[in-house]
Amino acid sequence: MSATKLVSISAPANAARFSPKDARAIFRRNGYYGTTSGFCVGYEQANVTMLPSSLADDFEKFCRNNYGCFPLLYRSNPGEIYAPPLAKDSDIKWDIPRYVIYANGKMVDDVMDLDGFSSTWGDVVCFYTGCSFTFEHVLIENGIELSNVKAGKNCSMYCTDVMLRDAGPFAGIQMMVSMRSIQKSLLNTAVTITAQYPHHHGAPVHIGDPLRIGITDITKPDKGDWQVTLEDDSVFVFWACGVSNTNAITAAKPKLTFCHYPGSMFIADTKAERKIFTETIQVVQLSRPQDPYFASIIGSKTVAILSQLEKSLLDDPGKRGIAHLSVEHDFMKSVLSLSHSKRVLITTGFPANVDLPQKQETDGICGALSMCQALLALGKQVSLVSDQSTHSILEKCVQKMFSLGALTSNISVISFENATKLMETSPKDFPIYDCLVAIERAGRSADGTYRTMKKKDISMFVDPIDDLFLYAASNPLVSTIGIGDGGNELGMGKVRERVAESINFGDVIACHTPTDHLVAAGISDWAGYAISVGLYAVSQCPIHWRYTCRAINAEAPQPFKSSEFLPSNEQVVLLLEYMNDSLGIVDGITKGSGSVDAIPIKTVLEKVGAMLTLL
């Protein structure tokens, strides 16, 4: 029966109490043609894709490649109308409220049954993949109101700019997502619950700003209903969606194909399996308070590692009072921001040795290059920006670490002027850099000068790289990170009042340029190494890894080694010797060799070794 002219319909008031068998009986007599959201509480629901047998193997591979969208519950034999593991008496030609028919990749009709195609059914293979409707009742039972279920309507579904992984003719396909609006205070609950249903799309693939995944108008779903009550404390949460099969069908262009109508699912006799997690999941906001909300997710075990790393940085060999400058959880937010980034710009450079021919100090460079190494291991694009006076020095340090094998590619070092042009000319919705990092970088004080810890004006040696960070603050898609150990470094503007109160000469030297996230450390290099260790830790967190991969080919994290994220002790020592002996760069405090901020390199590396024991 054709359903193309049918109007939207609400689910029966008692649909939640239906048995799957009773629901299928209603569907078989064409007694209902709407969404199955809210039906048969506690039972599995499934998307269904019905393809010619010649495409079956490729589609199964496509499902495996994109498990978040297509958690495969059952693949039928050719011509099979039953799904024995899911239901005893099913008939897939009748047991869904509404179907869509495609010819050569184009939708040609939607109907309430497929009985008219019985004569050609012998070549059809059916794929049953888990649906998020399965876990909706658990969210409701835990105090999370779902406006679509309350109204008896379909959920909202959108096409994103996230590309799925190809398999044969199923190529160039964009992910579809379903959306629910969740209160911020209940985000941890929602993510933890849904992660326990990996066979029904699992945890979300995106939390917050729709524009970050290519959705330009959230009030106009591509499929389903807009049935959301917008509240100040609510956040858009997106799950991978089985209706991505419509994009797959369009791409492969089979002669004749069928699938469920979006929101009209096959309801199985089987109860949903709930995976028990040994750790909780934490939602971490990364966006600025004034910007559209965006958050990451991470497992509690990894949170504990990052917290210990952050605490370890507060060892204060210089007795500067660095603990007063620490912002709790900003270390974790820095690591997560870098994990989500694609194109990172790092700057370092503090001309502390103003009375020597080479003004640059040793602290900062090793930490910056360690972060470069970790980011390259994760497949990020990385560049460095420097003052004109230190450009060649930084280039030589990069080349040295490349020749030593620490860096897998020779990173470009660009000038402040070129970086400014690149940032100002790149489109706001696709910035040339999506994360800026300053480590041991001289920061501008209240009077516009740059000063050492002893108040010496070093402005003549410093380019205004602060301006790049201030410009980045106007773009919600760009995050900024500052790393310092004294209060006069770029980024310390986030805590400038604390610098003025707790650091010697703080009222004069305090940097007034803030960053989104600030990492304070006993010496800045330690923070660079700690972020590298932290990036390794989050890369091995299955919960976070799946989220960053959008559940595409992400059943398990990539098996990295920590040595891929950090230079070896020998490489660090050789770099420091090269800086001391060949470039004339010396310790900013002792003015000597073999140390960083008066800490012998052996002690610096012992600290890094202790960080690795936290993994």
Image (tube, grey):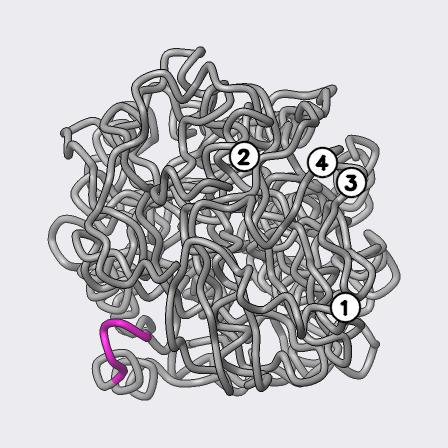
Residue at the disc numbered 3: 603
Q: Position of residue 159 (x, y in %)?
A: 37, 64
* Main SS class of the magenta portion in the image: loop
Q: Is residue 62 left or right of residue 330?
A: right
Q: Is residue 118 left or right of residue 400?
A: left
27 or 341, nearer to the observer: 27
Is residue 453 covered in magenta? no
Residue at the disc numbered 4: 89
Q: Mark 3 or mark 1, which is nearer the start of the sequence?
A: 1
Tally the numbered discs: 4
Looking at the picture, does residue 9 appear above or below residue 55?
A: above
The magenta-colored residue range is 426-430
Alpha carbon distance from label 4 to label 3: 71 Å
Q: Position of residue 372 (x, y in %)?
A: 62, 67
Q: Mark 4 or mark 1, which is nearer the start of the sequence?
A: 1
Camera-near label (2 vs 1) is: 2
Amino acid type assigned to the residue bearing label 1 in the image: Lys
Is residue 428 covered in magenta? yes
Camera-near label (1 vs 3) is: 1
Q: What label sits on residue 61 in the rendered view?
A: 1
Q: Mark 3 or mark 2, which is nearer the start of the sequence?
A: 2
Q: Position of residue 587 (x, y in %)?
A: 60, 56
Q: Residue furthest left?
A: 447
Amino acid type assigned to the residue bearing label 3 in the image: Thr
Alpha carbon distance from label 2 to label 4: 10 Å
Q: Helix, strand, or loop for circle 1?
A: helix
* Residue at 55%, 33% in the rendered image: 318
Crowd band around label 3 with a 10 angstrom C-alpha radius: few (<14), some (14–19), many (20+):
few
Residue at the disc numbered 2: 24
Crowd band around label 4 with a 10 angstrom C-alpha radius: few (<14), some (14–19), many (20+):
some
